[in-house]
Amino acid sequence: MTTLTIASLDPFDESAMAAWHATYNAAASYQRSYAAPRALEEMRTQLQMENPGERLLGFTGVSGDRVVVTGTLSLSLKDNLEQAWLEVHTLPELRRNGHGSAMLSHLTAEAQAHGRCLLVTEVAYPYDARVDGSGHPDVEFLRNRGFELGIADVQRVLDLPADEALLEHLIAAAEPMHRDYEFRQFRGRVPEDIVETYGELVGSLLTESPMGDMEFEVQVMDRERIRAEEKISEASGRTKYTTVALADDGTAAAYTELVVARHTPEWAFQWGTLVRPDHRGHRLGVALKARNLLWLQRECSRPRLVRTYNAEVNTHMVAVNERMGFRPVERLGEFQRRVEPGW
Ligand SMILES: CC(C)(COP(=O)(O)OP(=O)(O)OC[C@H]1O[C@@H](n2cnc3c(N)ncnc32)[C@H](O)[C@@H]1OP(=O)(O)O)[C@@H](O)C(=O)NCCC(=O)NCCS
């Protein structure tokens, strides 16, 4: 068998980056109708630019003269300091040769060397597979290497253009329940006057939404990080559409975000949606999502599909999505594994 050589990816090396991406893209799209691999330009920018909140590293596994396996490691720098988020992708035609395991061991050692002891990853599998994914090759890969399912999610999609009359009806029906809130919408940068309250709300998404056994901490989304991530987003071609509900004391009570990416313009991505626990019960969730989608659709005609992920157990958010017309297409398992830190 040819030996595998694993090395760090230099995102400034154009041909190395293109070869890395071709393998990642082929692996991430294999046998999936609703895969959404990040575009080369987007990935390159994210790997090249400094982010005070997160360090993103790429790795390449070469056998002969081919990149047969890729890896990424993401290290949160302001919070969740135990964690390392990782991804492994092997060319479909070269699977079951030990390449994925070798990359996973390499990423594990890197994570340990950075003092991380909680490895986190995710894997997609068909909607008609078992909820926990057992039996699917990629899930078995993780389970056989010490990972456990933390939470099972479902990807739902909505074909665009969405039914505007339905969205307007949802907005109007919910309105009497939240007359005391002010809605603000912004494309791109968060307005300076709400950056702190918005950051606090967004930072609590991982702890305030259902996360099963996943061990997430509150994220520190301070002004420095928000502004840095906005620059990276802009440079990588992403545009974020946000709708926020402000309580009468100016606090951000709820938000929702949709993202369109210049390099994959046919898709819009639903990012976070959160209503703070003390502001629930006012139909802010449905109102925000319907308002944001209506706005995006009127501003930007290129996306043909919106994608959203929800925990299987997040019945409230799933009900909101289904009312808007989303349909389930694929499952996603979030997995984790504890290891010894390496220092
Ligand atoms: C998961 C993935 C990285 C594995 O890559 P690989 O190079 O085939 O990995 P290895 O050869 O080291 O290990 C494959 C393991 O997967 C599991 N596996 C694969 N096919 C399987 C099947 N049909 N039934 C049961 N287990 C299976 C086994 O544990 C197998 O190990 P074995 O061959 O020693 O039995 C690859 O399939 C891939 O790129 N998938 C898409 C991305 C992804 O889901 N990544 C995982 C999350 S990071």
Image (cartoon, grey):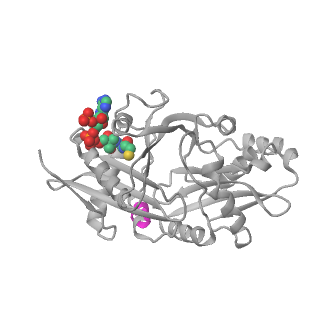
The answer to whether residue 159 is left or right of residue 127 is: right
Q: Name the residue nearer the viewer: 183 or 221.
A: 221
- From the image, which quarter does the C terminus lie in? bottom left
| Residue 81 location (% of width, % of height) | 49, 59
Residue at image point 42% right, 67% down: 45
Q: Nearer the viewer, residue 331 or 54?
A: 54
Left or right position of 124 against 202: left
**Relative image position of residue 313 (x, y in whole percent):** 61, 34
Q: Residue 287: percent from the left, percent from the top?
A: 76, 47
Q: Is 184 left, or right, of 26 in this rendering?
A: right
Q: Is residue 333 in view?
A: yes
* Above or below: residue 124 compared with residue 339: above
Q: Is residue 50 magenta?
A: no
Q: Magenta residues, as a range?
A: 41-46
Q: Quadrant of ligand 1?
A: top left
94 and 22: which one is in front? 94
- Name which residue lies at 39% across and 55% down: 341
Compared to 208, does 322 lie above or below? above
Q: Is residue 195 left or right of residue 78?
A: right
Residue, far left: 1
Tally the numbered discs. 0
- Image quadrant containing the N terminus: top left
- Quarter of the view holding residue 48: bottom left
Q: Between residue 115 and residue 195, name the one nearer to us.
A: 115
Q: Which residue is painted at 52% across and 66% down in the image?
A: 53
Q: Is residue 299 visible?
A: no
Q: Main secondary structure of the magenta part?
A: helix
